[in-house]
Image: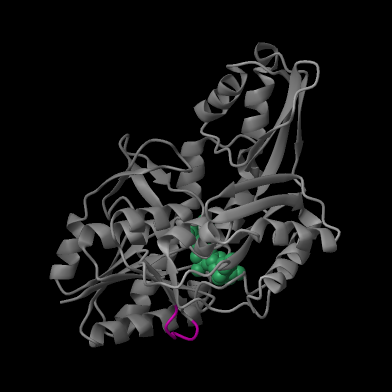
Amino acid sequence: MALVVQKFGGTSVGDADRIRAVADHIARTRRSGCDVVVVVSAMGRTTDDLIRLADEVSSVQPPREYDMLVSSGERVSTALLCMALAELGVAASSFTGSQAGIVTDTDHMKAKIVDIRAGRITEALEAGKVPVVAGFQGVSTERDVTTLGRGASDLTAVALAAVLGAEVCEIYTDVTGVFSSDPRIVPDAHKLLRVSFEEMLEIAAAGGRVLQLRSGEFARNHHVPLHVRSSFTWEPGTWIVEEDDSMEQAVVTAVVHDVSQAKITVARVPDKPGIAARLFRALADRSVNVDDIVQNASVDGTTDISFTVPRTDLATAVEGVSGHLADLGATGVTSDVAIAKVSVIGAGMKSHPGVTATMFETLAEEGINIDLISTSTIRISCIVREEDVERAVRALHRAFDLA
Ligand code: ADP
Ligand code: ASP
Ligand code: MG
């Protein structure tokens, strides 16, 4: 029997009615003759609420306890969904990440999956049940509960789909697919019927949170077909597919923005070999993910180095750099959270010059100043002021005729 993994995000299971609607859909899928493994997120904004609660309780949050806390939201959804399925006569069993055999390393809050021992899931399937798995979490090799990073229920779903050999991993969310821009900001954005993994990964990395980046990478590496679609309309959504020469490559496919980053500037570091290595080693040792990096031209043998990091890593990063200032020979470190990144992405960019010029001209016409620039073969990103970013997205979406 064909196996489908269905993942439902927070809004999709946001209240009792939504949970019943999701249960109906799972029952329909079962009736159509498929085996189903379900992965759920925490209801609505539960994870944000739990994080806020922790902040109210204490400024000291041991990572083990943080994971114990925030993983609880997903557990609630699994049990409630199984109850809704029971009322429909569909046999189902809930599983925490640990029970589902998601084994991770010990890096709390952003743990990596090291093994999947899905024995209990296959047993439940063989018994004719629908396994309902709590997303976003696992158990470490030290037997503690871990979480896999924000938005990582997508990763749980893709990882299970890979190990169980599912025909497709369906990511159900509150929009009808992957769009040419966030439809909440650009109302005339259009839905993409198919996107290559190459473009999807750039969209995810640039902040288009409709699919979590690591889940996209995992799906590409393990050849898991992905279908991003709506749990409100249930209509067909966007297929994420392997690159294929017959696909028409749009010059620009999407305009994406990200307001989750902050900028750090290390002032007046000596312009000599080994300094950048030392700086970024200090950050890597603290598991800080550095994104864009710019080193200015040196004056009098010293230069400023600026880079962006996730806002959630800002305090750790600043503390890490501050501890090395003397060692680096730098005079100080400053940070700025009121920044945002706007990116244009398109596989056709490789063979079409001029995208960068159009992007800069468009931002200039809007009077938007560019702080940092970075590129890949199919992406151009600019760091701008946060208050300008939505205007930048709309202007670029217009300039590249994506409506
Ligand atoms: P879920 O809780 O279902 O995982 P997310 O909030 O993580 O949902 O992702 C869905 C949201 O992603 C949408 O509500 C939309 O606002 C946002 N989004 C950002 N960029 C895009 C895009 N290019 N296409 C579709 N949605 C996008
Ligand atoms: N509930 C988790 C979060 O909000 C995981 C997820 O939704 O994918 O990040
Ligand atoms: Mg998500």
Magenta region, main secondary structure? loop
Q: Nearer the viewer, residue 164 or 354?
A: 354
Q: Residue at x 21, y 63 (%)?
A: 165
Q: Nearer the viewer, residue 111 or 270?
A: 270
Q: Looking at the image, is 119 positioned above or below residue 92?
A: above
Q: How is the image coloured?
A: one colour
Locate residue 123: give its quadrant.
Answer: bottom left
Q: Looking at the image, is 212 positioned above or below residue 250?
A: above
Start-end of magenta stretch: 232-237
Query: Does the rendering let one see residue 258?
Result: no
Q: Looking at the image, is 392 positioned above or below residue 377?
A: below
Q: Residue at x 86, y 59 (%)?
A: 367
Residue 242 horizontal/vertical position (percent)? 35, 64
Q: Quadrant of the image for the N terminus?
A: bottom left
Q: Quadrant of the image for the C terminus?
A: bottom right
Is residue 14 shown in magenta? no
Left or right of 46, for residue 240 = left
**Outermost residue, right side:** 367
Is residue 233 shown in magenta? yes
Residue 343 horizontal/vertical position (percent)? 63, 57
Residue 50 horizontal/vertical position (percent)? 57, 53
Left or right of 168, for residue 192 = right
Q: Nearer the viewer, residue 261 or 300?
A: 300
Query: Does the rendering let one see residue 291?
Result: yes
Q: Residue at x 47, y 57 (%)?
A: 201
Residue 332 horizontal/vertical position (percent)? 77, 22
Locate residue 359: give its quadrant.
Answer: bottom right
Q: Nearer the viewer, residue 338 or 69?
A: 338
**Outermost residue, left side:** 126
Q: Residue at x 29, y 60 (%)?
A: 223
